[in-house]
Image (spheres, rainbow, N blue to C red):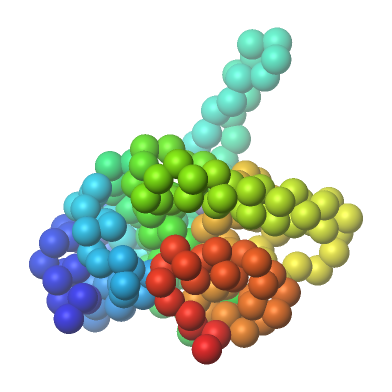
Amino acid sequence: MAATLFLAQKEFTAAQGFEVTDEIAVAVAAQACLPVLRLGLDAYSGFVGIVIHPDEVVARREVMDEDGVVHHYDETLTGEAMEGGPVMLSWHDVEAAGESAEWGYNVVIHEFAHVLDMADGVPDGVPLLPDRAARDAWRRVIEAEYAAFCECVDAGDDTLLDPYGAEGVDEFFAVASEVFFVAPEEFRLEHPELYALLASYYRQDPAA
Ligand SMILES: [Zn+2]
C-alpha cells in the first residue's frame, strides 16, 4: 500500500514540543498519497523530512523595496514546501481536512502539489512533464486560466478556488490541485480545461 511505503520512506519530526503519533503520521501519509496514486511515490523522492507543528506557524519575513529599504513582516503558515524538503505542516489544519474540504481546502494536497511543481527544480506551476511540447501545452492552459482567475479575484468575485491562488502561478497550481481532489465535480464544471489538464497529469479522474 502506498501509505505504508510513504511512512517507510519519509522521516517525521515534531516541532514545538509536539509529538507525532502513529495516527498523525498515517493521516498525513493517506492524504499525501492521494495525488500520486498513479504517478507513484517516486514523484516525492526529492525530499525525506516532514515537520509537524501543532498549529499555524508565524514566519518572520523580510523584503527589500525599490529604495533598498528592508521591511519585516510576519506571515502565518499552515504549511510550507521547500525544494529538497522538508515539508512543514500544521497538524491543526491537517486534522481539519474533513471540514475544510467543504470550502475546497486541503493543506496536505496543497503542499505536496508544490513538491510536484518543484520536481523540475522551479516552482512555476509546471510539474515534471515528459518533454518541451508538453510543457508548452501546459503553460498555454494554466497561464490563460491563471490570468482569468486573477481578474475574478481583482474584481472581488466569489471563486471556487482559494483567492490565495492569485499570488502566483505556483500557488494557483497548488490551490487548483486541492479543489481537483476535494471538490472535483464543481471544479470540472467551472474549469473544464484546467480539470482536463490536471486529470491528464495526475492520471486520475476524481469527478467520474
Ligand atoms: Zn502554497
Residue 146: x %, y % from top left: 69, 52
Q: Residue at x 43, y 58 (%)?
A: 113
Q: Is residue 108 above or below residue 58?
A: below
Residue 69: x %, y % from top left: 65, 14
Residue 88: x %, y % from top left: 35, 54
Q: Is residue 156 left or right of residue 163?
A: right
Residue 175 position by quadrant: bottom right
- Considering the image in quadrants, where does the N terminus appear? bottom left
Residue 158: x %, y % from top left: 81, 68
Depth check, front residue: 145 or 66: 145
Residue 186 position by quadrant: bottom right
Q: Residue at x 55, y 28 (%)?
A: 62
Residue 171 seen by the camera: no
Residue 69 seen by the camera: yes
Residue furthest to the front in view is: 133
Residue furthest to the right in view is: 155
Q: Is residue 141 left or right of residue 177?
A: right
